[in-house]
Amino acid sequence: MITPYFLENFWGEKNNGFDVLYHNMKHGQISSKELTDFIRERSTIEEAYARSMTKLAKSAGNFSQLGTFAPVWDVFKSSTEKLASCHMELVRKLQELIKEVQKYVEEQAKAHKKTKEEVASTLEAVQNIQTTSQALQKSKEIYNAKTVEQERLRKEGATQRDVDKAGVKAKKATETYKSYVEKYATAKSEFEQKMAETAQKFQDIEESHILHMKEIIQSYSQSVDETHIQIGELHNEFVRNIENTSVESLIQKLAESKGTGKERPGPIEFEECNTAIATEGAKPRKRKPFGIPGRRKDKDTDSTESTEVEAANTANGAPPGYYGAIDIQNANVPQVDAEGFCIRPEVNENDAKENSFYSSSDSEDEDEPRKFHVEIKPVQPNNGTHQNRATIDELKASIGNIILSPSTSGQMRRNQSSDELAKPRVPTSYELNNDLLSLDPFSPTLAAGSSSSVSSSTVPVPNRPTTPLTAGALVPPPRPSSRPKLPTGKLTGINEIVRPFSPPKTSNASPPPSAPLARAESSSSLSSNASLSAGNTPTVGTSRGPSPVTLASQDALPIAVAFTESVNAYFKGADPTKCIVKITGDMTLSFPMGIIKVFTTNPSPAVLTFKLKNTSRLEQILPNQQLLYSDPSQSDSNSKDFWFNMQALTSYLRKASDQNPSASYYNVDILKYQVLSDGIHSTPLNLAVYWKCTPSTTDLRVDYRYNPDSMFSPWPLSNVQILVPVDGGVTNMQSLPNSIWNSEQNKCLWKLSDISEKSENEGAGSLRAKFELSNGPSNPSTLAVQFMSEGSTLSGVDMELQGAGYRLSLSKKRFATGRYMADC
């Protein structure tokens, strides 16, 4: 049993003990929340350390696997991964402990609220005794003053009337003073009783609170202690593994894995030449392969000829036995007469003719004139087609590894007419980069993460020679001659529309001229005319020309980036505080086809590093963990550095290339993020809806206002459409401005032109409609709004490349609506 310290030490003249004890109880909640914050911060540190160790383990796995030291890196990698898992396990335990503390904080708040109700009577007793004490002190002062005044008048010889008047006042003050003394005695008794009970209650609450806090701290300490024990065991295991990895075992592994064989070269002995084989009689044998027809051998042939030929054959790479061995027993050795002359055998005339083409004796050369073997082959009917084809194949084989510069006039771009291409052109510095213009990272397929096949066709330039295009030099199909109208049925619901609107497509017959795109180092923004249709470009598809990377690996490689944001909002009546907003975004990088060859041929390409700017406006960032690294301990709150795992990036691009080898570029989803929202101030278009429903008619008004402050840089809203369902059997509709009524779906659709600060009333306006009903009244429904903006984002987030080896060739920014709705 703990000594009742609160009961003995919280009284005093001013009776403030209750107030001190109550506030001390409230401080317990603050302590609990601060302990939660401390454990959460420790968890964050442990998680950052675990991620850093995981990154270090991956680095150890990427180190050189050559040499005898390579197996040691496996020990480092395994130990580091286990260490990272230990810290992640500690993070998990701390997260569970945080949940327990938060649960305790909620229970503590409920207990304090209940205690406040229970001690309300004590608070009244405290206030009563404090009030009574003050009144008693004041009445005492009045009583003393009146008594002194009466005695002074009596001594000074004042009139009896004044003395009697002073006596009445003194008597009244005496009665008041006595009454407060009695009230104070009653209040004091009640206060002491209530305060004693309350002080003990407060002490019990504090004892329970401190005990619970100590249990939490003990759990925290136990989790950390268990982690340290595991780390110690891992360290001992690492030491044992290093000790077991002896020098002999490392050398043995290298010998077994990289060994070239255990057979040593055998001895070679000197062999004397066999003169019988080297004599002239060996000539009638069949001619060796690759021999020259019609050539006579000299009579005094070197005896080492056969050995030299055999060595030459071996040096030329011919397999053993390819040329055949000489059969000494069956060799045609000539018979010699007594004088040493050869006896010519009798041969058939036909055989002689057949054999004379390949070999002859000296006598034959003297008696017969030299014969020539002439063979005339007929002309092939295809006039050299096979030869030309073989020549082309040989050229392809010989120049397979040579990268050619792109042809600036090999094909027609989509936004050029044949007359424009017929004019002489001067190559500009942006011609190579212009191929990346075919990238449309805002296509619906990008959001869905799927790729679509795009048929490609090349348009030759009239009256000009063209160069055959490579496999990657494909051109997207031409745009349709006219843009079909958007069917009203497509707007039946918000959920169906993932990427709401596409920019208006221009006719292919007379395309508008587009200005050259400046280098994106200045983060160029594209208008809807300069960008491609959102539904016309796949995630992995073709571009308008060959891949822009037709350069050596030491040149700066072009990269394109796209930021796509989606704004979701729900407006409730005209109250701005009820507006719910959520803004999300995606960042996509586009790599040209040619960059894959640069990555694969270079064993260690330059690491692609970039800085994400204006991150202070972001609430959450989710990078692609398989491709990106980042340092969680960065101090700059307005930027964040990322760098690529080049091995994983190369593998990803190679896999994408294998799946679609004809693509000219490949889009890679890098990260997703959520933007900090400030309610209605974060919405590009503010809405307010008003309904007036009667049995016969329904009046509708929609007020809208363009909000440039929501955007990092104000940009017009295009393709604005507002869809309102109206029930009740609409028989007639009048609207201002004019709208479209779909009787099958009972929906009213407004299509507005671009809305910006330059619009009428600075982008503010109203939509009005009156509906005549046959089965009213109507029920107010939720209206849906869709719009998009090319060239800007709501967050203002941007990318800046760091280091050398890469350049930003194109930057696209866009935002559009997701679920954008309004109710009355």
Image: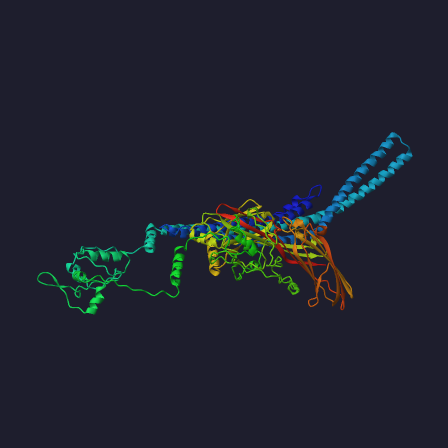
Q: Is residue 70 visible?
A: yes
The one nearer the camera, 172 or 132, is 132
Q: Give left or right: position of 640 versus 120.
A: left
Looking at the image, how many numbered discs can be counted on the residues? 0
The one nearer the camera, 288 or 684, is 288
Please determine whether, in this image, residue 146 is positioned above or below residue 712: above
- Residue 571 sits in which quadrant? bottom right
Residue 234, image x and y in percent?
43, 52
Residue 330, image x and y in percent?
17, 66
Residue 803, image x and y in percent?
49, 45
For the C terminus, which image quadrant? Answer: bottom right
Q: Residue at x 15, y 58 (%)?
A: 275
Please determine whether, in this image, residue 380 is positioned above or below residue 585: below
The one nearer the camera, 489 or 426, is 426
Residue 536, image x and y in percent?
57, 59
Q: How is the image coloured?
A: rainbow
- Residue 765 sits in which quadrant? bottom right
